[in-house]
Amino acid sequence: MTQRLEQQIAFLNEADKLKSVVRATELCDNSRYENSAEHSWHLTLYALVLSDQAGPDVDINRVIKMLILHDLVEIDAGDHPIFGSHDVAAMAAQEQEAANRIFGLLPNDLRDDLRAIWEEFEAAQSPSAQFAKSLDRFQPPMQNLQSGGGSWIDFDVTEQIIADRVGSKIAIGAPALWNFARERIATFFASRL
């Protein structure tokens, strides 16, 4: 029992490092950039509040688990902004290696369970994972709209780039959320002309 608890606490202590991973998205009030732990927490809140946007086959409790775990690999692999440029294959390899190390801190049963939830999110094949991915892509635009453009300005992003990089990912699991976002994004960019 003591060894199991030591492993669980080691994992939880390691997870605390996610608070030090700074993302490219500013807080809604423009006061600073958010960290990945804040992003994960905010996404779980999005899942609770926007659960009525999920399809009938979506398990919101599983979505919440995915969202609280999905960015843990950033402790080792770092955050890769969606509008940045990076080698996708190299990033995926780094994240797999990080998942091996971080989930490997846990007792075997928890390691296997939590790793499977993370893998399900990454694959985005199940209805729950598709909804979770949709929320992961929906939340940053909502923050960018609230903060006056945020990372869109930093990365010189256009309305079309947003549609191409996040629109289809949101629409797969939450089409009404993409419609909502698309209208507001269009208004934002029209106001900048």
Image (cartoon, rainbow, N blue to C red):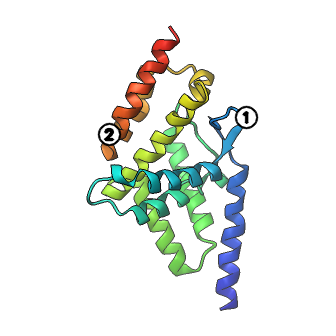
Secondary structure state at the residue bearing disc 1: loop
Name the residue at 60% across, 71% down. 104
| Residue carrying label 2 | 176
Name the residue at 64% across, 53% down. 37
Looking at marks 1 and 2 on the same chain, the residue that comes earlier in the sequence is marked by 1
Q: Percent x, y for residue 27?
A: 65, 38
- Nearest the viewer among 46 and 57 is 46
The reply to whether residue 124 is visible in this rendering is no
Q: Amino acid at mark 1?
A: Ser
> Disc number at residue 31?
1
Name the residue at 43% across, 65% down. 61
Q: Amino acid at mark 2?
A: Ala
Q: Percent x, y for residue 139?
A: 50, 41
Q: Residues within 10 Å of mark 2 (few under 14, many from 20)?
A: some
Secondary structure state at the residue bearing disc 2: helix
Q: Residues within 10 Å of mark 1 (few under 14, many from 20)?
A: few
